[in-house]
Amino acid sequence: MLYIASKAISFAFIYAFTLRAEHGLSATPDSLWQNRQFRIYLGSTGLSGVATSMQQLLITWLLVGILVLPAAQVGVIQALIGLPGLILMLFGGASADRADPRTLLIRAPAVPPGSSFPHALLALVWLTS
């Protein structure tokens, strides 16, 4: 829930920066740190990173602490969880080089990075063990 809220805030502020720039208004004051919108955006992006890290930690805790899986199996599962992100980064980077930066900044936070894959993999492990 924290992840979704922080992404929504990030999306709203990126969109606000874009609208201000399109209408000829200054998107930033003299110092970027004086801009309240930037500080909120930075805070929401930080919270999003914390939420993603907590998800990764909790998946490991579920595998080791609750399902009591051996270390080798936990390592394979963690690698499988990270594999789609690694593959998608290659294609995403290539397509980002061809895209308009402003459009990319608006659309990218709206797509959660593989949020359902770890849950599906965890469910599969739980059902097969």
Image: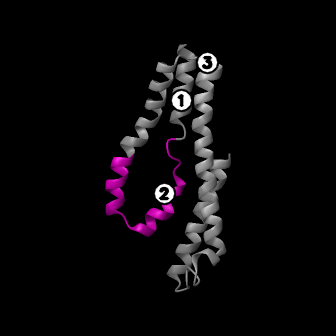
Q: Which of 35 and 27 is in front in this view?
A: 35
- Image vertical order of residue 126 relative to residue 87, above or below: above
Residue at 65 percent across and 20 percent down: it is 66
**Quadrant of the rendering where the N terminus is positioned:** top right
Residue annotated with mark 2: 108
Could you tell me residue 114's position as x and y percent? 50, 41
Whether pointer 2 and pointer 3 mark residues with C-beta atoms closer than 8 Å, the reply is no
Q: Which amino acid does label 2 sit on?
A: Ala
Could you tell me residue 5's position as x and y percent? 66, 53
Q: Which amino acid does label 3 sit on?
A: Leu
Residue annotated with mark 3: 67
Quarter of the image holding residue 123? top right
Q: Foreground mark, 2 or 3?
A: 3
- Specify whether residue 98 is painted magenta: yes
Which disc number belongs to residue 120? Answer: 1
> Would you call the spot at circle 3 few (<14 residues within 10 Å), some (14-19), or many (20 or more)?
some
The answer to which of marks 2 and 3 sits earlier in the sequence is 3
- Specify whether residue 87 is painted magenta: no
**Quadrant of the rendering where the C terminus is positioned:** top right
Q: Which amino acid does label 1 sit on?
A: Ala
What span is in magenta? 89-114
Residue at 53 percent across and 56 percent down: it is 109
Q: Foreground mark, 3 or 1?
A: 3
Q: Which of 15 and 3 is in front in this view?
A: 3
- Image vertical order of residue 46 relative to residue 14, above or below: above
- Image vertical order of residue 17 relative to residue 24, above or below: above
The answer to which of marks 2 and 1 sits earlier in the sequence is 2
